[in-house]
Structure formats: C-alpha cells, structure tokens
C-alpha cells in the first residue's frame, strides 16, 4: 500500500509555506531551480516518485515509492541568516533531519550518524542524502533537496544499493507516515532557522558528537586531486579537517571516496 502526503495537514500547520505534491518528477531540485523566479518562499515540493534524483558529484539518487523525496526553497535573508553562515546550511539541514529520524522512528540517537558534508547514516547504512543548490535568479534563494528512505522497501533495489542503504521502517518499530515525517522536518526547519541562538547551539554540536568520519582514515577527491588523511572533525566554518604527513588540510568542498 502506498503512503501519500496529506497536503491539508501540512498546509494547516505551515500556512506561510507554499506546498506542491507531485505524483512524479524527474527531480524536485531541478523543478524548483526552474520555478524559482515564479514561486514565493518558503516553498516545499514533494515527488511521490522521483525518476532522476541527483546527489553530490553527479551521483544519482535511487528512490522508490514510500520514500520521502522533496526540496525546500527559501531565502536565508528572510530568516536573518547572514551570507557568512549560508555555507553551513547543508550541514545544519542534515543535523535537523537527523533529529526527525530519531523522533519519528523512536530510534536511539547513537544509531544515527552524520557524514560530511550532508549524508545521514542509520545502523551503518545510508538513510538520507541532501543536496544544496542556488538557482542564481533570484540571487537570495537556496534550494535544498532531501531524499529520505522512510517506508520504501529495498527488495527491488539493485544489489549494490541494498548493501549500502536502509530505510527508517527497516530499523524502527514505529508505524511511520510520510506526512508525519515531513511535518517533523518542517517543524525542525522553522524552529532552528528562525531562532539564531537555537541555530548557533545546534551547530556544530550535532556534528561534534555524531560525525561518522571522526578519527577514521578518509580519502577525498577534490577537483581530481585525491587526499587521504585522518579526520579530525569539522570546524566552525563547516570544513572537513584531514591530517596527513604534510599537515592539517581544511576541506570546504570535496567528494568522499572511502573511509575506514
């Protein structure tokens, strides 16, 4: 049985938000990037089925019905978020989605970890991916795409995905509804992004306590150059800290290739 978003529940709780629910889209991020100049913010676009989801580094995002695939478009300036903090938005989003996974699924916090720059792992497998993009017009708008495995079964997924991915339903005893999970994420989003002190308290605490890569040997690809070093955490600017024989590297943008 397919679980569907109930728009009336979301619209009643978040009257300031524009909500669109589509049966199918190639990519919710792509859709909002194309519609950015036409839609008011904040806006949420949900696809019951996403056929061309994208991740960082050009990776594809495989999804099935009963997963939660959506994008949020908002203006950081409306929330009073200065440009100096906007580079942290994907990290903060990952941390707030982590909170929703824990509360919605009634899952112990030690089972849910963050992987720089913005992936979420549950019981050692990927449960959520996040992609932040800027359409350029208008220039004060940011689009954050979120692909979260909620009730989707991996029985029909390719073998290589089954080995690496998990859904909340697989790890929880709770009977989850997509509307409930989306509601929780949007509530956390408003709570954290509207309150500067709450936002400052939230980051970098979650990443300091629950970063999957800390003290592991990590290999990254940075514009075709590979670096391998021991991860020493995330600094206040959101950079990954890797130490190798040449010293400490502050990595602001890269693709994680491997870790152990």
Image (spheres, helix red, strand yellow):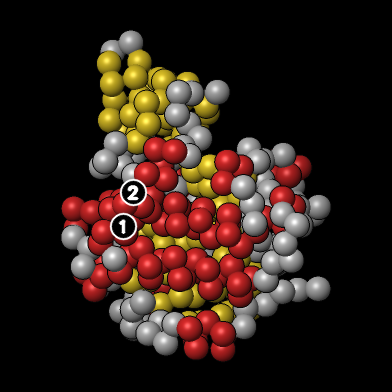
Disc 1/disc 2 C-alpha distance (Å): 6 Å
Decide which of 116, 232 is in the foreground and name it. Answer: 232
Decide which of 84, 62 is in the foreground and name it. Answer: 84
Decide which of 177, 47 is in the foreground and name it. Answer: 177
Q: Secondary structure at mark 2?
A: loop
Tell me where residue 149 sits by quadrant.
bottom right
Tell me where residue 190 sits by quadrant.
bottom left
Image quarter of the N terminus: bottom right
In this image, 198 relative to 23: left or right?
Answer: left
Specify whether residue 239 is in view: yes
In this image, 214 relative to 89: left or right?
Answer: right
In this image, 168 relative to 232: left or right?
Answer: right
The residue identified by callout 2 is 203
User: Which of the numbered marks, if any, corresponds to residue 127?
Assistant: none
Please tell me which residue is depicted at 72% across the width and 54% down the height of the picture.
Answer: 172
The picture places residue 44, in percent across and down from the top left corner, at 46, 75
The image shows residue 109, relative to residue 152, as above or below, that is above
Image quarter of the C terminus: top right
Q: Secondary structure at mark 1?
A: helix
User: Which of the numbered marks, if any, corresponds to residue 199?
Assistant: 1
Please tell me which residue is depicted at 45% across the width and 71% down the height of the picture.
Answer: 187
Please tell me which residue is depicted at 33% across the width and 78% down the height of the picture.
Answer: 41
Please tell me which residue is depicted at 62% across the width and 83% down the height of the picture.
Answer: 6
Specify whether residue 140 is in view: no
Question: Is disc 1 surrounded by few (<14), some (14 to 19) or many (20+) residues within 10 Å?
Answer: some
Q: Are marks 1 and 2 in contact (CB under 8 Å)?
A: yes
The image shows residue 246, relative to residue 88, as above or below, that is above
């Amino acid at each position: 049985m397919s679980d569907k978003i109930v728009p009336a529940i979301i619209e009643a709780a978040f009257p300031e938000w524009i909500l669109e629910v589509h049966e199918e889209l190639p990519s919710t991020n792509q859709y909002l990037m194309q519609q950015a100049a036409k839609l008011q913010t904040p806006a949420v676009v949900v696809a019951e089925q996403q056929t061309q989801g994208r991740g960082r580094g050009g990776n594809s995002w495989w999804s099935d019905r009963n997963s939660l695939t959506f994008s949020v478009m908002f203006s950081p300036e409306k929330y009073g978020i200065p440009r100096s903090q906007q580079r942290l938005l994907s990290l903060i989003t990952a941390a707030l989605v982590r909170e929703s996974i824990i509360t919605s699924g009634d899952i112990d916090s030690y089972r849910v970890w963050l992987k720089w720059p913005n992936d979420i792992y549950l019981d050692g497998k990927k449960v959520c991916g996040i992609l932040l993009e800027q359409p350029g017009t208008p220039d004060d708008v940011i689009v954050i795409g979120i692909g979260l495995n909620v009730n989707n079964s991996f029985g029909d997924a390719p073998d290589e995905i089954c080995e690496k991915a998990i859904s909340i339903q697989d790890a929880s005893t709770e009977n989850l509804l997509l509307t409930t999970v989306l509601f929780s994420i949007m509530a956390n989003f408003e709570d954290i992004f509207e309150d500067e002190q709450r936002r400052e308290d939230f980051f970098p605490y979650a990443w300091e306590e629950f970063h999957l890569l800390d003290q592991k040997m990590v290999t990254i690809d940075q514009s075709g150059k590979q670096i391998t070093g021991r991860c020493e955490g995330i600094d206040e600017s959101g950079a990954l800290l890797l130490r190798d024989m040449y010293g400490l590297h502050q990595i602001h943008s890269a693709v994680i290739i491997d870790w152990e």
